[in-house]
C-alpha cells in the first residue's frame, strides 16, 4: 500500500520520476535504520549465546574429566570445585531435555508474538526496558516521521498517509497510537494535538509537528525530525555497544575464569600438601 499509494500520487500529479527518487531515498534510509537497530540487538544476543555454549561445553565435556581425576585424590574438595562439579552433573543429566524444551519455548513465543495481544505485550515491554527502550523508541519515531513525511510530500492525503504509516510501523504500540490519532484528525483536529496525548511521541516531536502544520511545511518538518532521530539512533547504538561490549566480555571472562580456577584448586591444594 505504501509504494502503490506513492506511485498513484506521482502518476496523478505527473511527477512519477520525482516520486520514484523519493522512494529510493526512503528505502535506503529505512534499510540503514533497520540495520542499526538490528546490530544493537543482535550483538549482545550473539555474545550471550556464545557464552552459554562455551559453558555448556565445559560442563559437559571438560569438567567430567577433572571429576574422574579428583575421585582418587581423597579428602574434601574445595567448595567452588564441588559447586562446579554439581552444576556439571546437572548439565549432563538434563541437557537432552533442555534442548527440546528451549526449542518449544522459542516456538511458543513466536506463535504468541504473531498474535495482536502478544505483539502489543512484547513491544510494550521492549519500549519500557531501560537498556533497549530508548533506542527502540527513537527508531520508531524516526520511521514514523520518515514514512509520513515521504507520503505527504508525494501528495498522499494525510488520513491515507497515517493509515499506511500505522500499518507499516513495525511496532504494535506505535501502530495503535497512530490509529487512535486518525480518529481525532478525521474530526478536524490538527495532527499535533492528538499526537501529544500519545506517550510514544516526545514533546519535542509534537512541537515541531505543530510548527510544521502552522507554517504549511509539515512534510519538510517531518523529514527534519526523521534526520534528527536517525542521528539519535546512531548515538544510541554507539553508546549501547560501548556499554555492553566490555560488560559482556567481563561476564564471560569471570564465568569461565571461575570454572577454571575451581577445577585447579584441588591440584594446588594437593601440591601444597606434598610440599
Image: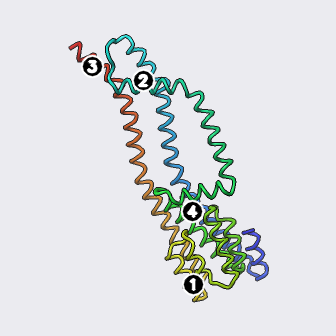
Label 3 close to label 4 by CB (< 8 Å)? no
Locate residue 32 relative to residue 153 in the image: left or right.
left
Residue 37 position within the rendered picture, expressed as x and y whole percent measured from the top left: 54, 58
Assess disc 1: are there few (<14), some (14-19) or many (≥20) residues with their C-alpha within 10 Å of its C-alpha: some
Estimate the spatial distance between the alpha carbons at disc 1 and disc 3, rounded to whole Å: 74 Å
Assess disc 3: are there few (<14), some (14-19) or many (≥20) residues with their C-alpha within 10 Å of its C-alpha: few
Marked residue nearer the N-terminal end (4 or 1): 4
Marked residue nearer the N-terminal end (2 or 3): 2
Tell which tag, 1 or 2, sits nearer the viewer.
2
Label 2 close to label 4 by CB (< 8 Å)? no
Tell which tag, 3 or 4, sits nearer the viewer.
3
Which residue appears at 68% of the width and 57% of the height?
A: 116
Estimate the spatial distance between the alpha carbons at disc 2 and disc 3, rounded to whole Å: 17 Å
Tell which tag, 2 or 4, sits nearer the viewer.
2
Q: Give the numbered dot on residue 212.
A: 1
Residue 209 position within the rendered picture, expressed as x and y whole percent measured from the top left: 56, 80
List the residue tagged with mark 3.
269
List the residue tagged with mark 4.
33
Assess disc 2: are there few (<14), some (14-19) or many (≥20) residues with their C-alpha within 10 Å of its C-alpha: many
List the residue tagged with mark 2.
85
Residue 200 position within the rendered picture, expressed as x and y whole percent measured from the top left: 55, 68
Element on which disc 1 rests: helix
Amino acid at each position: 500500500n505504501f509504494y502503490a499509494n506513492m506511485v498513484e500520487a506521482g502518476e496523478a500529479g505527473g511527477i512519477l520520476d520525482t516520486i520514484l527518487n523519493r522512494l529510493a531515498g526512503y528505502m535506503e534510509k529505512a534499510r540503514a535504520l533497520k540495520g542499526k537497530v538490528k546490530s544493537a540487538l543482535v550483538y549482545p544476543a550473539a555474545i550471550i549465546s556464545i557464552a552459554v555454549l562455551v559453558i555448556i561445553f565445559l560442563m559437559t565435556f571438560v569438567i567430567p574429566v577433572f571429576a574422574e581425576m579428583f575421585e582418587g585424590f581423597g579428602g574434601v574438595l574445595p567448595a567452588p570445585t564441588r559447586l562446579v562439579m554439581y552444576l556439571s552433573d546437572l548439565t549432563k543429566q538434563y541437557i537432552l531435555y533442555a534442548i527440546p524444551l528451549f526449542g518449544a519455548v522459542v516456538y511458543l513465543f513466536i506463535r504468541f508474538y504473531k498474535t495482536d495481544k502478544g505483539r502489543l505485550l512484547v513491544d510494550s515491554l521492549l519500549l519500557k526496558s531501560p537498556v533497549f527502550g530508548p533506542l527502540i523508541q527513537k527508531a520508531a519515531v524516526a520511521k514514523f516521521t520518515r514514512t509520513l513525511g515521504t507520503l505527504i510530500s508525494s501528495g498522499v492525503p494525510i488520513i491515507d498517509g497515517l493509515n499506511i504509516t500505522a500499518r507499516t510501523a513495525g511496532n504494535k504500540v506505535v501502530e495503535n497510537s497512530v490509529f487512535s490519532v486518525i480518529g481525532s484528525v478525521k474530526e478536524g483536529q490538527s495532527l499535533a494535538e492528538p499526537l501529544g496525548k500519545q506517550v510514544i511521541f516526545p514533546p519535542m516531536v509534537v512541537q515541531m509537528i505543530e510548527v510544521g502544520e502552522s507554517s504549511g511545511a509539515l512534510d519538510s518538518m517531518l523529514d527534519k525530525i526523521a534526520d534528527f532521530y536517525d542521528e539519535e539512533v546512531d548515538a544510541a547504538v554507539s553508546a549501547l555497544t560501548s556499554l555492553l561490549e566490555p560488560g559482556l566480555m567481563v561476564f564471560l571472562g569471570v564465568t569461565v575464569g571461575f570454572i577454571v580456577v575451581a577445577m585447579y584448586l584441588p591440584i594446588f591444594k594437593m601440591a601444597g600438601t606434598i610440599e
